[in-house]
Image (spheres, grey):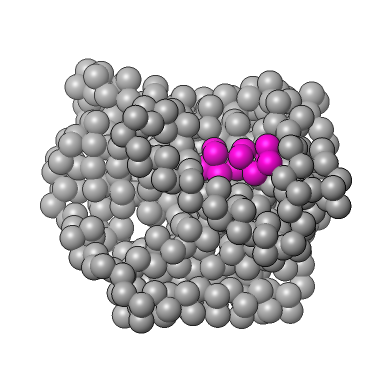
């Protein structure tokens, strides 16, 4: 790893500009037709993390920079606030009892599976490995935004983020492949389970066409979105610093309070006309801030630690097995179709990006159900992941 003073770029603005340029090139490449098959296997989030990691290793960017600290302090609350105000709580509540139960069962599987898996393999892992798995719990209950939020909340060392992202990608996408394979068996499963398929039709009845409401972004709305995001981030960071930290090991830090504030306030604002900013791209700006933050975390990572993943992988595999077992048990109890098992799982592990894909393979007309269940995962994400982090901390400590 390089010395910060020996890096080619040291000026914070230059470092920020370089990371933004890298992300721009990654997303430009992801839109090229010849590279589509590559990006189906390697999602942009992986490159957003690892290209900055390699850049630091090569001496282009420094291991430490004020740019990284600024990005980690403010871009997380910006991203979370803008993602939360875009959520349609009413549409999620109209999904139906079975869909919500299966999504919650998937969340319970992540919350309980992590500590059990860490207990099984913890003897072969570093003492602070639980902090890395706390970040993974965030990813598997809501997506990348919650992974970063949990990493900041529990103070996950930068060296652990590489293995966590490898496990998140390999195990998470591997599990998605298993769910896609099982779609060919859904009729047999539903017959064996005496599944209530009427719930599928009921869920489809209550869908709302969110995408059809989007409008081209204009300058006034863009500035309102940026102003709301950064203004809210500054206020939440200030307020979070005023609230005492809690827990032993410490789980509720000043950063955690700031995250909880922006998530809760964002959800409250989603019930007001502020949610209309989503039509002009509030969540898109939020995801942009999130990817910039991931690039800053990657730039501080140790490439050697990224390669040290076998035991981390073992924890991830057992974790997913426990998650799947709880889902199947609950599905048996409430006679849920395999569609809700798969979509409820991916709404947690994959989030809003992957859940509609899985849902669409099982029932093409019900792909929007996966979207809404994935969005619901964002809501549960920070709260469920905090519970998982507490249990992981007890096991790890």
- Is 299 drawn above or below residue 122 in the view shown? below
How far from the left and from the top, in percent, is residue 343? 33, 38
Looking at the rendering, which quadrant does residue 52 occupy? top right
| Front one among 29 and 71 | 29
| Residue found at the far front of this picture | 8
Q: Is residue 86 left or right of residue 317?
A: left
Looking at the rendering, which quadrant does residue 382 occupy? bottom right
Looking at the rendering, which quadrant does residue 327 occupy? top left
How far from the left and from the top, in percent, is residue 358? 31, 34
| Front one among 98 and 260 | 260
Any part of residue 88 in sight? yes
- Is 219 drawn above or below residue 117 in the view shown? below
Q: Is residue 54 one of those drawn in magenta?
A: yes
Any part of residue 394 in sight? no
How far from the left and from the top, in percent, is residue 394? 75, 44
Q: Is residue 217 one of those drawn in magenta?
A: no
Which residue is pictured at 62% across the width and 77% down the height?
A: 234
- Is 324 drawn above or below residue 249 in the view shown? above
Q: Quadrant of the C terminus?
A: top right
Which residue is pictured at 24% across the width and 65% down the height?
A: 214
By secondary structure, the bulk of the magenta-drawn segment is best described as: helix
Q: Is residue 314 left or right of residue 37?
A: right
Which residue is pictured at 19% across the width and 34% down the height?
A: 363
| Front one among 94 and 253 | 253
Q: Which range of residues does the magenta coloring cover?
A: 45-55
How far from the left and from the top, in percent, is residue 39? 42, 33
């Amino acid at each position: 790893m390089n010395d910060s003073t020996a890096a080619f770029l040291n000026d914070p603005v230059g470092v920020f500009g370089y990371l933004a340029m890298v992300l721009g090139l990654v997303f430009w490449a992801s839109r090229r037709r010849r590279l589509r098959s590559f990006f189906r296997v390697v999602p942009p989030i992986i490159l957003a993390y690892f290209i900055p990691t390699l850049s630091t290793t090569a001496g282009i960017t420094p291991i430490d920079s004020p740019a990284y600290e600024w990005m980690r302090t403010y871009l997380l609350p910006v991203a979370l606030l803008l993602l939360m105000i875009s959520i349609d709580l009413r549409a999620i509540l109209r999904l139906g009892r079975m869909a919500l139960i299966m999504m919650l069962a998937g969340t319970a599987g992540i919350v309980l599976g992590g500590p059990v898996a860490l207990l099984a393999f913890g003897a072969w892992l570093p003492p602070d490995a639980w902090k890395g798995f706390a970040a993974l719990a965030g990813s598997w209950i809501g997506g990348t935004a919650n992974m970063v939020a949990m990493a900041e909340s529990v103070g996950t060392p930068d060296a652990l983020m590489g293995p966590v992202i490898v496990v998140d990608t390999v195990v998470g996408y591997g599990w998605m492949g298993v769910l896609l394979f099982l779609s060919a068996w859904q009729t047999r499963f539903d017959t064996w389970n005496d599944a209530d398929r009427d719930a599928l039709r009921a869920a489809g009845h209550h869908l709302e066409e969110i995408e059809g409401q989007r409008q081209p972004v204009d300058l006034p709305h863009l500035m309102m979105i940026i102003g709301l995001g950064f203004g809210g981030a500054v206020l939440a960071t200030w307020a979070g610093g005023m609230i005492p930290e809690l827990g032993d090991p410490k789980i509720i830090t000043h950063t955690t309070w700031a995250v909880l504030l922006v998530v809760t306030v964002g959800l409250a604002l989603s019930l007001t006309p502020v949610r209309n900013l989503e039509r002009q791209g509030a969540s898109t700006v939020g995801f942009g801030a999130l990817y910039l933050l991931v690039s800053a975390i990657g730039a501080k990572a140790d490439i050697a630690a990224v390669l040290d993943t076998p035991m981390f992988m073992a924890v991830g595999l057992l974790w997913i097995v426990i998650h799947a077992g709880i889902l199947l048990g609950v599905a048996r109890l409430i006679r849920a179709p395999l569609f809700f098992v798969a979509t409820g799982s991916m709404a947690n592990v994959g989030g809003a990006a992957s859940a509609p894909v899985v849902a669409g393979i099982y029932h093409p007309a019900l792909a929007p159900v996966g979207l809404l269940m994935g969005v619901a995962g964002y809501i549960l994400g920070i709260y469920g992941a905090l519970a998982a982090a507490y249990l992981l901390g007890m096991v790890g400590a």
